[in-house]
Amino acid sequence: MRIWLSLSLMVFMLAAVFKGCDNQALDPAEQPGSFNQAQEELTAENSSQGIVVITVDQAYRIFTENKGQYLFVDVRSEQEFADGHIEGALNIPVSQIEDNLSLFKDKQYIIVYCNGSTCDRSGHAAKILVENKIKPVYDIGGGGIMEWMYKEYPYITESQ
């Protein structure tokens, strides 16, 4: 009975996290159009704000197709970062974003993320960056790092 309850709770939590997530094909080659085309369209739609919300799958395409052009920033706590983060991501908790603005000045594109729809730390961090004239800023929506890890995209776990 205890196992069944645990499994039911896990299924409920996953459903809540992924509610409304983009369930496109995982293989970027199967996606119509290039990421750069999609990026231009998204940027045009949100250029006045400077914040572009992207899906986990779009973030993965950025990760695989545009290495070195983007800086992935995990805005969660150090412990959450150690529990699992995007390979190559920088950990700057949202409370420390303003203290580290100099790290963002020379980067062409910034991608921020947190736990996804269950938190808004990445949205808050994106607003801080845009208010300090760092844009565009891409914010991973949907299930955030939880969805990234669920889909088994490249991530690192430092804690045991």
Image (tube, rainbow, N blue to C red):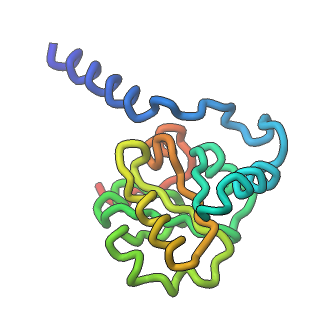
Above or below residue 51? Residue 93 is below
Quarter of the figure with residue 14? top left
Residue 129: image x %, image y %? 50, 73
> In the picture provided, is 139 more to the left or to the right than 7?
right
> In the picture provided, is 17 more to the left or to the right than 72?
left
> Observer-nearest residue: 19 or 73?
19
Residue 110: image x %, image y %? 59, 68
* x 50%, y 41%: residue: 142
Residue 154: image x %, image y %? 56, 51
Residue found at the far left of this picture: 2
Residue 99: image x %, image y %? 38, 84
* x 49%, y 64%: residue: 126
Residue found at the far top of this picture: 1
Q: Count up the numbered dots.
A: 0
* x 58%, y 65%: residue: 137
- Which quadrant holds the N terminus? top left
Above or below residue 62? Residue 109 is below
- Which quadrant holds the C terminus? bottom left
Residue found at the far front of this picture: 48
Quarter of the figure with residue 68? bottom right
Above or below residue 78? Residue 23 is above
Above or below residue 17? Residue 83 is below
> In the picture provided, is 24 more to the left or to the right than 132?
right
* x 58%, y 60%: residue: 51
